[in-house]
Amino acid sequence: MTTPSIPTPEPSALGAVCLVDDHGEFRQSAAWWLESLGYAVSTFDGARAFLDAGDPPPDACLLLDVRMPDMSGLELLDALKARGCERPVIFMTGHGDVPLAVEAMQKGAITFLEKPFQEAALEAALERAFAQARPVQTPGQESYARRLSGLTEREREVMALVVAGKVNKVIAYDLGISPKTVELHRSRIMTKMEATSLTRLVRMAVTATVDDDA
């Protein structure tokens, strides 16, 4: 099956929206409505399909379902941050869940919409997302980006799965390598990222910054 690509929006488009949701009917109707507003929309039926498509355009907004099989929207966001991909995010869910909403906002989400939501609510959230100013990189963010750039492509893949909470055996199966090779990659990742513990590595990946005082 051909992996979906993430289009670069035309100059006339309001912006690129990447919609990741495992419910086909919702994806289709939401994409049609967003395109009618003038957004360039690409849809994906799950987190893995989205990750396989490569990084979205720099000015894209991500519209992510929270509860998806295999990898949740929150885990997807962690994986994207682990490989240095920062984009505005709007989370959606069909289940009212206050702890999930709190966690989503802590991870930097623009907002958290409960399905079924009003079209006006999504439109307003997208307007905030695209209007959000990009802050100047702090020394901690620059340090994180520098360390991340020192990882090989395979090490980035392993790091993304480690941050998503996968154990070595699962990572080995997913990537088609041996558990010992995973252990070797993890050791090199910890060294290159200058992480003194797994908790420190996850914190860096989630915040995309380095706090040397932590």
Image (cartoon, rainbow, N blue to C red):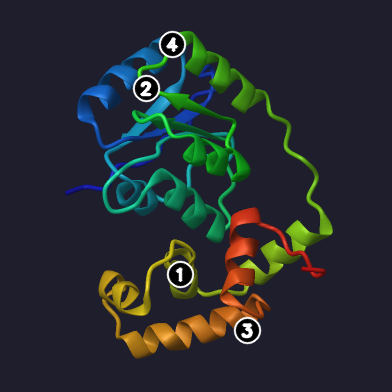
Left or right of 164 on screen, residue 4: left
Tag 3 secondary structure: helix
Tag 4 secondary structure: helix
Q: Quadrant of the C terminus?
A: bottom right
- Label 4 to label 2, Cα distance in Å? 11 Å
Q: Which residue is at 50% across, 34% downward?
A: 98
Q: How many marks?
A: 4
- Mark 3 near mark 2, Cβ–Cβ under 8 Å? no
- The residue pinned by badge 2 equals 115
Query: Height in image: 120 above or below 20?
Result: above
- Mark 1 near mark 3, Cβ–Cβ under 8 Å? no
- Label 3 to label 2, Cα distance in Å? 43 Å
Three-letter residue code for mark 4: Glu
- Label 4 to label 1, Cα distance in Å? 36 Å
Q: Which mark is residue 162?
A: 1
Query: Height in image: 70 above or below 45?
Result: below
- Label 1 to label 3, Cα distance in Å? 15 Å
- The residue pinned by badge 4 equals 119
Q: Which residue is at 53% across, 86% downward?
A: 187
Label located before the other in sequence (1 or 3): 1
Q: Which residue is at 21% across, 23% downward?
A: 25
Three-letter residue code for mark 1: Val
Three-letter residue code for mark 2: Lys
- The residue pinned by badge 3 equals 191
- Mark 4 near mark 1, Cβ–Cβ under 8 Å? no
Left or right of 177 on screen, residue 200: right
Q: Can residue 138 be seen by looking at this rendering?
A: yes
Left or right of 157 on screen, residue 209: right
Coordinates of residue 15 in the picture (x, y in percent): 53, 25
Coordinates of residue 192 in the picture (x, y in percent): 63, 80
Q: Nearer the viewer, mark 1 or mark 3?
A: 1
